[in-house]
Image (spheres, rainbow, N blue to C red):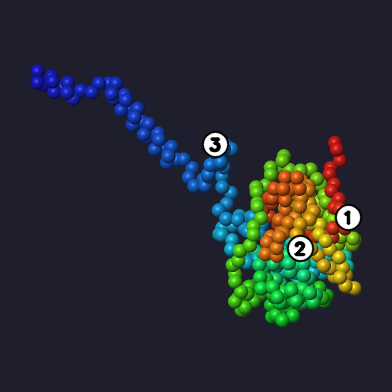
Amino acid sequence: MTKKNDQQKFMIPVKYIWAAGIGVGGVIIIAAVFWFWPRNQNIQPTNNNESNEQVAVECDFRGNLDGLCREFEDKAIPIAVMIDNHAEARPPVGIDKASVVFEAIAEGTITRLVAVFDSNTVPTDIGPVRSARPYFVDYATEFGAVYVHVGGSDDALALLRSRASVYDLNEFSNGQYFWRDNSRYAPHNVMTSSELVKRAMTAKSWPTEGAFGVWVFRPEAELDNRGRMTSAYIDYRSPAHNVLWEYNRDLNVYERSQGGRKHKTADGSQLMAKNIAVIYSESAPIDDYGRRETQTIGSGRAVVLQEGLVIEAEWRRDNLNQRTRFYHKQTQAEISFVPGQTWIEILPDHFPDLTIEYPDEE
């Protein structure tokens, strides 16, 4: 009897064996799922009020100027270079690598550019470099930039001497950081490079990091959600300087022509932009050379072109140290930009409105 009782003591009912087997199997399955599940997906939940889905994080850091992904936090002080845009100065060098480009009339009907670069990604060679104007100095000020130029108008040079928030690199007194390209004709042949500008910054103990206001950036729209405009024509009242931006819907970029020809760099790269902001500003000649006084503080009408859409807007800037920002005319919400290069076209407010073209209706 005792033996029988011992046997009964150690006999386990079949139902318990099945339960144990199922439990062990479940643990194995869970462990396998955990082991083989894709890791490092870098996902985060969306706002619970909007959706319970999860979305991939695009990148850890973004460039402060262009919103493009970076591998590190962007603290670099920008470099703003005056670029000669006279017909005889073309093609330019390096401006396809700029993050933001401003275009405005320098004198008469000749436009000039200031190209703003992230000093971490500035191209090797840049130019041709040309002289300063007060309103270009004003736009460089909103970045606290190193401002690179060859002389300038009296008003611009006086402004640079009095403005501590811009680091003035003038070829007239810093010739060692520039050279002349003998394949071009003067005065359209002064060049500089990222190495030389950074060498100047070191020699002058200028900071390499700085802070400035950052625009709002957003992801690109899918092809089906892009607009249908085909081109925008900007009339600077000069056949050599009038601008045509043609929208490439597949690539989601605007391709630039000027003077009736594709505008390309010296290495053959087509100038393109993700965003174009057209500013209408009070502007008038102030001397016999056709130099101008142009409003850079305050507000006024603007038109923003992005992803095939035309957005009626308002530009605003309360003081010199603030960024120029753009707001929807109807909602007054700040306009967000597509990551990539942005061009800002500055037109006198009495100049012709830009002409927008759309495809013929099918």
Q: Nearer the viewer, mark 2 or mark 1?
A: 2
Residue in the picture at 76% in, 67% down? 136
Residue 286 percent across, percent down from the top left? 86, 70
Amino acid type, label 2: Thr
Nearer to me, 77 or 59: 77
Q: At 78% from the left edge and 48% from the top edge, which residue is drawn?
A: 312
Farthest residue to the top: give it.
1
The quarter in which the C terminus is drawn is top right
Query: Residues under labels 1 and 3: Cα distance?
Result: 49 Å
At which x and y percent is residue 60? 55, 53
Q: Earlier in the sequence, mark 2 or mark 3?
A: 3
**In the shown orientation, is residue 259 left or right of residue 130?**
right
Name the kind of residue labelled 3 in the image. Asn
Amino acid identity at mark 1: Pro
The Cα atoms of the two marked residues, 2 and 1, are separated by: 19 Å
Disc 2/disc 3 C-alpha distance (Å): 45 Å
Q: Residues within 10 Å of mark 2 (few under 14, many from 20)?
A: many
**How many residues crowd mark 1 within 10 Å: few (<14), some (14–19), many (20+)?**
few
Name the one closer to the observer, 241 or 161: 161
Residue tagged 2: 296
Q: Residue at x 59, y 67 (%)?
A: 209
Q: Look at discs 2 and 3 and give the one toward the viewer.
A: 2
